[in-house]
Image (cartoon, helix red, strand yellow):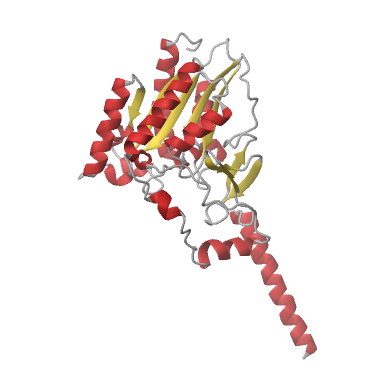
Amino acid sequence: MKVLLLLIVVVVVGLFLVLEVGLRSLFGFGNPLIYVGDDQIGYLLAPNQRTRRFGNRIEINEYSMRGSPITQTRPSSTLRVLLLGDSIANGGWWTDQDKTISSLMMHSLASLTNRNYQQAQVLNASANSWGPRNELAYLEKFSDFNAQVTVLLINTDDLFATAPTSLPVGRDRNYPDSKPALALEEVWQRYIVKQKPIPELKAVQNEPGDRVGINLEAIGKIQALTRQSNSQFLLVMTPLLREIGEPGPRDYEIKARQRLSDFTKAEQINYIDFLPIFNSNTEPRGLFHDHIHLNLQGNKFVSEVMERSLLEILSQSHSQII
């Protein structure tokens, strides 16, 4: 009887160890990216992290960017672009480090720089669910890192984004502030246990007033900061999957889109609206990972269009680039 009991214990422990090791090595559970709260930004990815999720490498540098360590001051031999955005720019767990929009652009721009630049950098300052006010606060806190061009990549939903808040950090399972002791613990918390509501978030989500106007104002302030540092500014907006084709955007989105278009013309902002560009693509749905995020083909498509615009902007500003 004792031998049988011992055998059962050994088998259970063995299965536990195999499952724990498998979840860690194959899927990266037990080592999630963690977040930190910030009074102005709301939240950002904790600096200096490395992990691998579902086989995809993710690295966060000392400035909470998705990417390798950098110097705050741009080397004179470097062409530097600062990309501000949300999960579309960040790429999330479903995108390997080398397949993010910033990495694809960086590799391509590196082959185009002439002898005046030894390298190209596309810095990726982004986090899930950021809106223009989060991105403005990041820029105000960390500066533009002497980038020659600052790119703000938003999606249609960002026109209605609410004020920055740190409430989700440590309370929403998608924004953990510490690592679990076990991979099994993370799986249990993420997929089995029901998410507890955060009552205080209701006030944030029900923010009154003209949200579109507030976010347009934040975009205008980002442009103003780039001008102060003699940098160029490019605004890019990607659509939601349901906006593509018929019936297209909803009425309130059409109005918000028109306001953005009028705003960019009035403020002379370089602007790329990807909705008509996606609609002209033969298989636009094949560019999406889900209803809002892009897959590798989508990242390539967007990065190529953005790159052409960047080169035009840099050429007009007399930068030393081919």
Q: Say which residue appears at 40% left-offset and 36% top-offset.
A: 154
Report x, y in % for residue 11. Answer: 71, 76
Q: Say which residue appears at 44% left-offset and 11% top-offset.
A: 317
Task: Name the quadrant containing residue 39.
Answer: top right
- Measured along the vertical axis of the image, is residue 271 above or below residue 59? above
Q: Say which residue appears at 51% left-offset and 41% top-offset.
A: 127
Q: Is there any visible trace of residue 249 in the rendered image?
A: no
- Furthest-bottom residue in this view: 1
Task: Name the quadrant containing residue 301.
Answer: top left
Q: Compare residues 202 and 96 and report the one nearer the observer.
A: 202
Q: Is there any visible trace of residue 55 in the rendered image?
A: yes
Q: Compare residues 189 and 292 and report the one nearer the observer.
A: 189
Q: Compare residues 236 and 119 and report the one nearer the observer.
A: 236
Report x, y in % for residue 120. Answer: 56, 21
- Furthest-right residue in this view: 2
Q: Say which residue appears at 65% left-offset and 58% top-offset.
A: 180
Q: Compare residues 69 and 223 and report the one nearer the observer.
A: 223
Report x, y in % for residue 1. Answer: 77, 91
Left or right: 1 with respect to 218? right
- Measured along the vertical axis of the image, is residue 270 above or below residue 194? above
Report x, y in % for residue 170. Answer: 58, 54
Task: Name the quadrant containing residue 257.
Answer: top left
